[in-house]
Image: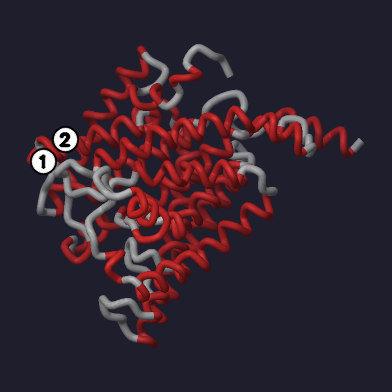
Amino acid sequence: MRQAAEASRESAHPPAGVHERIRGVDLARAIAIVGMVMVHVGPTGSEATGALGGIYGLSHGRASVLFVLLAGLGVSLLDSDRMLDGDRDSARSAARRRPAWARLGFRAALLLPLGLALQLLDHGVLVIVQYYAVYFVVAAGAMTLRDRGLLGAAVLAAVVGPVAYLGAWHWQPEWFSGPATALTDPPLVIARNLALSGSYPLVVWSAPLLFGMWLGRHDLRATSARWRMVAGGLAVAVAAKSAAMGLGAWLGTPGTEPSWLQLAVDDAHSEMPLWLLGATGAATAALGGSLVASDRFPRGTWPLVATGQLALTIYVGHLLVLAGWPALLERDDVLAAALSVSRFTIVVAGGAVAWRLRFARGPLEAALRLPWAGRRG
């Protein structure tokens, strides 16, 4: 009887993503996009002074981690059919995953040249699109891991990845001082930067990617799970910041040269463990809050949900604007930058709603699904 009741509950709450899109995930994706735009158009770090500057600077080093965590979560939603009947037969599981692998491979094949080409433009942004290509390749392989193995791989990446990054920086500092990876670089340099020494290196950023995949295997519609993400994520973020402050007071602040003392810092995009832990915790809390808000305020959040559904198109679009007409967005003052981002958000949200009233997907989002455009499911 107990097994029958559990089976009934599971059938009443199918794996997230099997039947319908989860609006809270799209809302979180919109938050990530707006956060990255904030970093790209306004002052960050020491330039963002005062209370308003501190609030504005919260997105620095966190928005992009949220974007990658959501990429991992999306992979698990794409793979959610594997959980429908609890089948554990490896041959049948592999057969079921082939469509997901094909989709991820096609996305990687499109995003790699697109991101490398976008890096050639004069926008001053460290483009993340090309890194998604290698993220999706790794995620395709990680699909075969059980839940514990996936979480263990995420924890291992969070510990070993920063150490490997710091060791390579100490061993070959010239790898980390060159320009951002672009289409004109030699293939081996592109591969090395994407994996180890670039702006969002796989060796470190696989941690939020894999953790996002692990989150995506849970019932994201469960209220208790959402609030656990909020509370747990905030607790981890605060603990990481507190640990960094304590270690900084004890060990002192390391210089700009590679040093093992760097392992104790949590500077944005330092690729170090405490920053990675804190940013992933903040991303998890943002996701949980977005899931709650999208259900409680469906009409009020719909413009941002629509924005998240066109995330790639909007991301690429803002790079084109920064390259061609930077004065439309870029500001040196925190208040002016906040107003600029607010205007940008209103415009793109309105455009996203108008687009979604007519089309199911954004232009670039549709391109990623082009071979499957005429199929259902």
Give neighbour class at mark 1: few <14, some 14-19, many 20+ (Cα, 10 Å): some
Disc 1 marks which amino acid?
Answer: Pro
Give the CA distance from mark 2 to mark 1: 6 Å
Q: Name the residue under label 2.
A: 321
Disc 2 marks which amino acid?
Answer: Val
Question: Which quarter of the figure is the N terminus placed in?
Answer: top right
| Residue 13 appears in the picture as rendered | no
* Depth order, front residue of 306/106: 106
Q: Name the residue under label 1.
A: 326
Identify the mark nearer the N-term, 2 or 1.
2
Pinpoint residue 108: horizontal percent, then vertical percent.
44, 37
Is residue 27 left or right of 343 when viewed as pictured? right
Is residue 341 left or right of 133 when viewed as pictured? left
- Which residue corresponds to the image point at 76% horizontal and 35% vertical from the top-left? 91
- Which residue corresponds to the image point at 79% horizontal and 37% vertical from the top-left? 89
Is residue 254 left or right of 91 when viewed as pictured? left
| Residue 182 appears in the picture as rendered | yes
Contact flag, marks 2 and 1 (Cβ < 8 Å): yes
